[in-house]
Image (cartoon, rainbow, N blue to C red):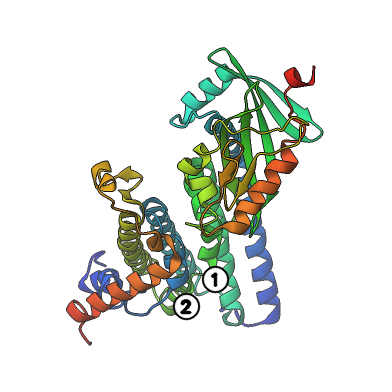
Amino acid sequence: MALFSKQNKEVFTNPLNLDHPILGQVLGICSALAVTAQLKPAIVMGLAVTVITAFANVIISIIRNTIPNRIRIVVQLVVVAALVTIVSQILKAFAYDVSVQLSVYVGLIITNCILMGRLEAFAMQNKPWPSFLDGVGNGLGYAMILVIVGAVREFLGRGSLLGFQIIPDACYDFGYVNNGMMTMPAMALILVGCVIWVHRAYFYKEK
Amino acid sequence: MKLNTNSNSYIIIYSAILVVIVAFLLAFVYQALKPMQDANVALDVKKQILYSLNIRDLDGAEAEAKYAEVVKEEKDVEGQKVYECQIDGQDICVASLKGMGLWGGISGYVAIDKEGKVYGAYFNHESETAGLGAEIKDSQEWQEKFIGKKIFDENGNVILSVVKKVDAPESQVDCVTGATLTSNGVDAMLKDGLKNFKPKAEEE
């Protein structure tokens, strides 16, 4: 079995473009709006979701034949909840500042529609390796949008990127003012809308 | 033999085993990471106290060292934590404060010098709105407005306050625009938390 057969490549690349979880399927919007006020938490959130989606996919895929059909959603939830709790604890131990910024949203990864969607739609029917690729692909697709929106919001809202000031003090002396609107969640929705618009206009092709 | 994965007994045993495995796993992770998490929380408190002393650019071990150098004594006065500090030969007392913001708890550290003036201040919050109420934590500029303000009047009442319209600039701070209720919370927290800190020199 080729690890990177054409089929497996598609499994990985589709969620980055055609079947993008946010742009194509418009899933996982709520957390995308909440954690993107700055770039750093957005990156960490994207990574956390990628790791959790990938491993939840693998675990569910390994045990997919033993899962009783009637309680499969419960089993999926238990696996996801366990992984999310572990990631949240690790963040608290090794990246305390970020975990304070992300606050409840790490816990809310449990209810991220992308996760449950991938488990139910992909991992329940496929072998572990393609499931892993699918999880990583979808997680990265999600992370990509978070990083784009986070970068724009931090740049325009605070004049910095990753906490480093980008806009020089001289501009502020000339009367430039940070756009406070950008730090509000509403602007994230508008930005996500713009990204979806650009994506539909230039990259998206009907299958 | 093929298992019937839809039988009731299978479902019950399956879920029981799954839950036990997950429970052990989580308990293990929690135990293994607890010391590091506690250390992070303790360091965060120390950093907040340093912030209130206008020492804002330290992290990790540097902050620990500076804290050990500056803070001489930690006291517990009627449930309120008080830190006796010394900076450049000056005795400073840092009071820890707790209060209610708009959406959740707020807290803060106010450093008081010997004359009963504010040496520095730092505020924190649990769930205030980013860009509005959260400015009490995020805006260093706003926290620095407190520096040099008079806390007490002649009778020892707390006159340091956060108001919409400043008429007594020596003891009042302009509130955060768009965050009146959070600012009121800070005001109430100051009134409540600082009343026991009238400097001894004035009492004599």
* Rendered residue at 52%/21% (across/down): B66
Residue with the mark numbered 1 = A76
Q: Which mark is residue A31?
A: none
Kindly indicate the quadrant of the structure image that contains residue B20. bottom right
What quarter of the picture does the C terminus of chain A occupy? bottom left
Residue A83 visible within the image: no
Sequence order check: which comes first, mark 2 or mark 1?
Answer: 1
Task: Indicate left or right for A200 with B129 as reference.
Answer: left
Same-chain status of marks 2 and 1: yes
Residue with the mark numbered 2 = A120
Most extreme residue toward the bottom, as rendered?
A: A206
Residue A101 visible within the image: yes
* Rendered residue at 36%/56% (across/down): A157
- In the rendering, at what x and y percent does residue A5 appear? 22, 69
Q: Is there CB contact under 8 Å for labels 2 and 1?
A: yes
- In the rendering, at what x and y percent does residue A79 appear? 55, 64
Task: Indicate left or right for A79 with A166 as reference.
Answer: right
- In the rendering, at what x and y percent does residue A192 appear? 34, 71
Chain of the residue under label 2: A
Q: What amino acid type should be assigned to the residue bearing mark 1?
A: Gln
Q: In the image, is residue A14 above or below residue B121?
A: below
Chain of the residue under label 1: A
> Crowdedness of circle 1 by 10 Å Cα count: few (<14), some, many (20+)?
many
- In the rendering, at what x and y percent does residue A63 appear? 51, 69
